[in-house]
Image (cartoon, grey):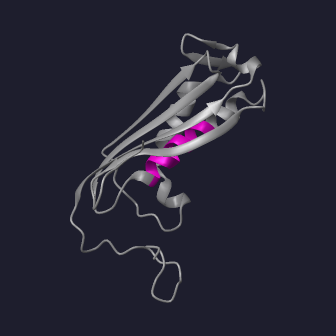
Amino acid sequence: MFSHLDAQNRPAMVNVGDKAVTKRTAHAVAVVSLPPELAALLRDGEITTKKGPIFHAAVLAGVMGAKKTSELIPLCHLLPLDDCQIEIKPDRDRAEIEIHCRLQTHAKTGVEMEALTGATVAALTLYDMAKAVSPAMVIKQVRLLEKTGGKRDYHAT
């Protein structure tokens, strides 16, 4: 049974009122494939366009996205984030950018949706800032790599 459905199969927020507050972490990644004309602009670990340094903006947007997850995903709980780290790893040889979002909270529910949202919003910001150079970028993967706390931990293989 899906946790976000009530006994009558209607959407419902999961009641976490009786759960204990525990430390929760999550790590998500988004992978963006760059077209050749954009990959050629990658220098010193950054891409700078007329709009400015793309990665700096993407990091800030990723943090904002993680913080606003409950406003974007209807049944997500509002969580206090203890830490949010966005790391951008360019790979010039593969013409790809990996965007990692690592989160920590002390809460009654997991923080994986916030990590996925943070990585995704950072990837979308990268796209927005670089589309004038080439709209041929592909956000080809967004996935959860790890979560800890709660009933069970998860580690992607």
Q: Is residue 140 magenta?
A: no
Q: From the viewer's perspective, tell me whether residue 142 is left or right of residue 128.
A: left
Residue 99 point in image, percent of width and height: 52, 33
> Is 124 above or below relative to 39?
below
Q: Quadrant of residue 31?
A: top right
> Which quarter of the rendered picture does the C terminus lie within?
top left
> Which quarter of the rendered picture does the N terminus lie within?
bottom left
> Is 92 above or below relative to 155?
above
Q: From the viewer's perspective, tell me whether residue 86 is left or right of residue 131.
A: left
Q: Quadrant of residue 7?
A: bottom left
Range covered by the magenta-colored residues: 113-124
Q: What residue is drawn where x is 49% and y is 68%?
A: 75
Q: What residue is drawn where x is 68% and y is 18%?
A: 39
Q: Nearer the viewer, residue 9 or 73?
A: 9
Q: What residue is drawn where x is 53% and y is 61%?
A: 73
> Is 26 above or below relative to 9?
above
Q: Quadrant of residue 101?
A: top left
> Is 114 above or below relative to 15?
above
Q: From the viewer's perspective, tell me whether residue 40 is left or right of residue 72.
A: right
Residue 127 point in image, percent of width and height: 68, 34
Residue 6 point in image, percent of width and height: 46, 83
